[in-house]
Amino acid sequence: FEAFKPSCFTHVASLRCAPPGTMSSPLLPTDEQQIALASLRTAWSEIGLPHAEAEEAITKLAGELRSVLSRTVEGEQARKAQLTADEASLRGELSALSAALAEPASPGTSSSEPPLLRYRAVISEVERLRVLRDERAAQRSAAASSLHAILLELSTGTPEEEQTRSTAADADEPAPEGAGGLTVELVHRLRQRLEAAEAERAARLERLAALRAAADAITEQLGTKEEAGCEGTEGDGASYRALSALEARLDHLREEKKRRLHVLSQCTEYIAELRHKLKIPEEQHPDLPSPEKDLSQQVLVTYHTEIERLEALKSERISELIPETRSRVAALAAELHVSAAELAAAVSSDGGDEEQQLYDLEAEERRLRERQATTVKLFALLSKREGVLQQRAEMRASANDPNRLLAKGAGVARRLLQEERLRTTIEKDLPRMNKRLREMTAAWEEEHAGERLHYDGATIVSMLAAQEEDDARIEKEEKARKEAEWAAKKAAREEAKGLQAKGVRPGARYSNGPRKGTAPARKSAAPDGALTPREQHAVNSPRKGPPAKFPPNAFVTPAPTAKENHA
């Protein structure tokens, strides 16, 4: 045992769990070892155990102690390696959790500390982030599932689009285990989207309620209440399919309401027209239901029955209605300047079937009234144009009067100024009116499928073209007349220059100026450059006696003043 003890306990002392100096006592103190061996030997000697067996037992005990120590050392060494591996794994998990939660991870240990302390610090931080991860994951899952449910309800109803919208609830967000997948901002965004979806759902439900109320109101007005709530949209919630179906149904009901209102409006106008033509007293008019309150099929039947009754009365009094209708058509034709040929082509002459005659007359009356309603502005402009043309004709007739410039009086200048202003206005307004009339006529003819609009037997376009051609001809003739007058004046000036070249001064006057107390001599209305009678007399009868001393340029006609030029 003494031989065995040094190697055994030296090995045991080298296998302590902490570095040297960190443990308060060795694994088994030497005194205790001696006491234990002495107690064993005493016990063995008391029981009479042979020395060989006692040594063998001590050897066996030493082997068992060595084996226990070896297993313990191996276990602690494996634990050390496992701690290192677990620490690395936990640090990876800690980094992933920190990235997913966007939370800082601080184990609070340095690499110089023992592995066990580092492990315990890391596992504590990991467990804290795991709890936070579970809370965030639950919040994200709740928001995403609620959002998914609302988006599924708001979807159009087709399986493909439902799957697309349901998977797109948080498809644009990172995965929960990815970086930023469980941040506070992400959960906040999901909740904001959830609130927006809930607001959209509430608005759509409100819209659906309004559409259903409007559809029910129109359905009740049309008298088809049994159709209310059809289309099977009640079970679709706030989906696009329900909204589209209800909008389509409401559009159909509105179109039906519009159609019935149009039919009843036409029936009302036709009934009023028949009553007016048949001269039925108002007290004999049966009460008809108002279309604004009731549009049921029964109302349509009531109006149809009244029309049949009035048409029967019309057939009985057809011989009286034909002359009245013909006179109304003639008055409309005169107002719209419809020629007799055009009117005769549209209305059959007397004789033949009376019903056909009345039918043609009424058709022509409707046509003329429709033209009257659609050409109000056009014919008003035509009437204004006729007034302008009449004023221009009067102005031209007045301009041809040779004595109008020789008239005297205070109103002559004012009248001439008014004529000049009127001429300027006509030159500006008439082309503008013609252009506007062409545009309005083209628009009317295009709207009425190419039908030509006539005015006193001629189309408006040809009438405007004829007036413009006539104006161009008159302007050309006036230009030629002015050119002839200018040529005559030019010839007179050339003749005067010829006389001056021969030594005759056309403008000579034997005078140094007007005498005192006398008015200047009145000029004669001789053509420009020609000799006045007084000048001609001075040329034919020269003064006898010594020549008088005249100042320079005494016989030169002075230049006309600005006032003379204006006159």
Image (cartoon, rainbow, N blue to C red):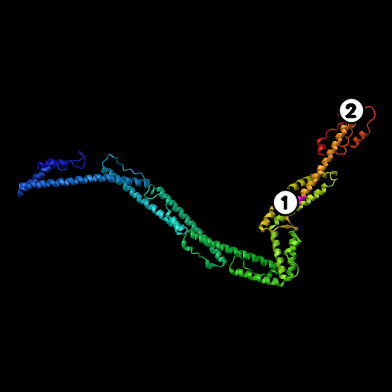
What secondary structure is found at the residue carrying circle 2? Answer: loop
Q: What percent of the width, then of the height, locates residue 80?
A: 24, 44
Image point (59%, 69%), residue name: 297
From this view, report whether residue 91 is shown above or below residue 557.
Answer: below
- Label 2, on which residue? 550
Q: Residues within 10 Å of mark 2 (few under 14, many from 20)?
A: few
Q: Disc 2 and disc 1: Cα gap in Å?
A: 65 Å
In this view, the residue in front, 263 or 402, is 402
Foreground: disc 2 or disc 1: 1
Q: Earlier in the sequence, mark 2 or mark 1?
A: 1
Magenta stretch bounds: 465-470
Q: Amino acid at mark 1?
A: Asn
Question: Image quadrant of residue 544?
Answer: top right
Q: Is residue 205 magenta?
A: no
Q: Position of residue 213 (x, y in %)?
A: 53, 62
Q: Nearer the viewer, residue 334 or 505?
A: 505
Location of residue 105 by image quarter: top left
Decide: is 274 above or below 448: below
Q: Is residue 474 above or below residue 246?
A: above
Q: Magenta stretch: dominant SS?
A: helix
Residue at the limit of the structure toward the right, as seen here? 545
Image quarter (top left, top right, bottom left or bottom right) of the N terminus: top left
Q: Quadrant of the C terminus?
A: top right
The residue drawn where x is 35% and y is 51% is 134
Residue under label 1, please give it.
Answer: 434
Q: Is residue 469 magenta?
A: yes
